[in-house]
Amino acid sequence: MSKKTFSIVSLGCFRNLYDSEIVAKRFLRKGFLLNPPVFTEEKYPRILIINTCGFIDKAKEESLEAIRQAIDLKKKAKIEKLFVFGCLIQRYRGYLEKFFPQVDEWWGIERFSKKFTSRQILSASCIGFLKICEGCLHKCSYCAIPLIKGSLISKPRDEVIKEVKFLEKRGVRELNIIGQDITSWGKDLERRPSLADLVRDILGATKNIRWIRLIYTHPRYFTSELIDLIADEARICKYVDLPIQHISDRILKLMNRTTTKSQIIRLIERIRTKIPGSVIRTSLIVGFPTEKEKEFGELLRFVKEIRFDRLGVFAYSREEQTPAAKLRQVHPSTKKRRFKELMALQKDIALKVNGRFIGKDVDVLVEEKNDDILIGRTQYDAPQVDGVVFLKKKDLRVGSFYRTKIVDAYEYDLVGE
Ligand code: SF4
């Protein structure tokens, strides 16, 4: 076991990865060395840190399993200390402390640090994540995030710009702007600046960051100003991440999504008209309490008609203390069947959607080298959640952009030359 080493296992979403980077930076400042994740390496660190996710049942299970595995390593004396933090701990700390006494330290979630902190210790160096807000203004009836993270706290504009400039200096070529709902940014700040204002300032303050990607945007606050900015500005990825969750008006109301079917349809039409060629990603929940067969059918028909370019499907997860947990629940086998049906439908759509790229020339950012194969991405795919482009060429540099002809397409990934 090395003397002053640590590893971080970061579970859950980009926002967690961002928080893990902050924690990693803190340990590096204290003189620790970062080890690769221990679960895949035969090289164990002295301290193992787990950043947990408590969003839905599946994520909670994954986090608990990681804690169990880490405790096992501690019992075998492979690691010396185990620290656990993140959403799951914020939510269930008292219970977990009793259940896992082998854990040495528990922390809740990372609050915004007043002091400027750099990122990109754990992710590829050409890709940067920038969290511009914490917590959430919305109160979706199924979601535990406002209970865990509280209401919206926007990072002030000057701090954002300082951080962006730092990331640019560190060689970031793709900046992913994240938060629970980034379209809410500024609503708690003086004079209520908009996300479009902030993105304009980021564009003005940088020139080497070639791609700016907006991740997690709520349809309620997706303004015409924002659509125009994405359409007009070449450096903003033509990638719209727009979780809509359902399309039946009754379910949307029960979910407290504050949007209606007609508003969502109009918004998608406006995006596709004003930003031709843009890719839209959404996420949907099936088996929400009281969801009837005909409402699920409405959702299927909608997905067939709209043909989302990228789609994430979740089976509803009952989260205690949320309003939806008190509603009549859909039987687990029905949820499972609906999940499978929607996934199968999207599989066909995804293949056709990706096929559109065959024969086209696109810019690819190379982010990884594995023996003879290079892995990159187009602006139409977000890191970690979407597909990649495989390139068979040896002499390309990681962190650079290359004009690439797409020669083949699979369900999620592309092949280029
Ligand atoms: S927008 Fe809704 S689903 Fe997303 S974090 Fe906020 S409350 Fe949760």
Image (tube, grey):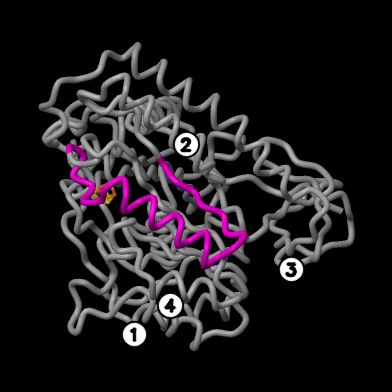
Q: Which amino acid does label 2 sit on?
A: Val
State the separation of the CA atoms marked 2 and 4.
Answer: 30 Å
The image quarter in which residue 194 lies: bottom left
- What is the span of residues highlighted in magenta in the rendered image? 254-283
Residue 115: percent from left, percent from top:
31, 76
Query: Could you tell which of marks 2 and 1 lies nearer the N-terminus?
Result: 1
* Residue 285 forms part of the magenta stretch: no
- The residue nearer to you, when weighing 3 against 164, is 164
The image quarter in which residue 81 lies: top left
Query: Could you tell which of marks 4 and 1 lies nearer the N-terminus?
Result: 1
Q: Mark 3 points at which residue?
A: 400
Closer to us: mark 2 or mark 4?
Answer: 2
- The residue nearer to you, when weighing 293 against 21, is 293
Q: The residue tagged with tag 4: helix, strand or loop? A: helix
Q: What residue type is labelled 3?
A: Ser
Q: Determine crowd level at label 2: few under 14, some 14-19, many 20+ residues with C-alpha closer than 10 A.
A: some
Determine whether 282 is above or below 130 in the image: above
State the separation of the CA atoms marked 1 and 3.
Answer: 29 Å
Closer to us: mark 3 or mark 2?
Answer: 2
Residue at the spot 25% in from the left edge and 61% down from the top edge = 111
324 lies left or right of 82: left
Query: Could you tell which of marks 3 and 2 lies nearer the N-terminus?
Result: 2
Closer to us: mark 2 or mark 1?
Answer: 2
123 lies left or right of 190: right
Closer to us: mark 3 or mark 4?
Answer: 4
Q: Can residue 1 be seen in this view?
A: no
State the separation of the CA atoms marked 2 and 1.
Answer: 40 Å
Q: Can residue 85 be seen in this view?
A: yes
